[in-house]
Amino acid sequence: MIFITARFTVHPEFADRWPEITADFTAASRAEPGCLWFNWSRDVEDPAQYVLVEAFRDDEAGAAHVQSEHFKAAQQTLPRHLAETPRIVNMTVPQDDWSLLGEMAVDER
């Protein structure tokens, strides 16, 4: 799978509304057949920073995402809300879901 994390620094005046601003893009991305997950988190120390954790089935699904109409629309509409260019980590990993964190195993009795 293609595993991506991207850090977005939003202008402070848009920070509280970022989930609303990205709602259409998020919903459309999650609806893509090759999208495994597409989840936003807000930084607890810097409320103007959001991290997007996303995964796509394979290279083909990742390419379909960046070529989609909703991605192209996001390229046009989201940057005006950003304080800087987003930072990204993009990796291909040999799995198709989250692995268990064995060091914090929970007894699920």
Image (cartoon, rainbow, N blue to C red):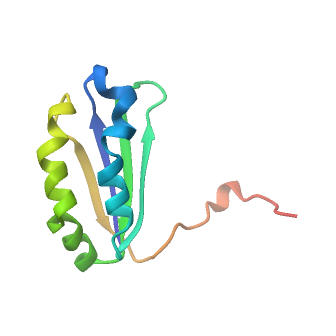
Query: If the image is split into quadrants, where does the C terminus sit?
Result: bottom right
Among the 4 quarters of the image, the one containing residue 63: bottom left
**Total of numbered circles in the picture?**
0
Residue at the image position 25 percent from the left and 24 percent from the top? 11
Tell me which residue sits at (36%, 76%) in the image.
Answer: 33
Instruction: Relative to 39, say whether 78 is above or below.
Output: above
Where in the figure is residue 34, as x and y percent of width and height?
34, 75
Query: Is residue 85 depicted above or below 105 in this figure?
Result: above
At 49% from the left and 29% from the top, the residue drawn is 44
Give residue 49's position: percent from left, percent from top.
Answer: 35, 32
Quadrant of residue 81 within the rendered picture: top left
**Quarter of the image where one finds residue 84:** top left
Where residue 30 appears, as percent x and y from the top left, is: 38, 63
Locate residue 84 relative to residue 20 in the image: left or right: left
Left or right for 32, reference 66:
right
- Please give the name of the residue rendered at 20% of the width and 41% of the height, measured from the top-left corner: 78
Relative to 48, say whether 42 is above or below: below
Give the answer, above or below, for where 61 lies relative to 98: below
In which quadrant is the N terminus drawn? bottom left
Of the pair 1 and 42, the residue shown nearer to us: 42
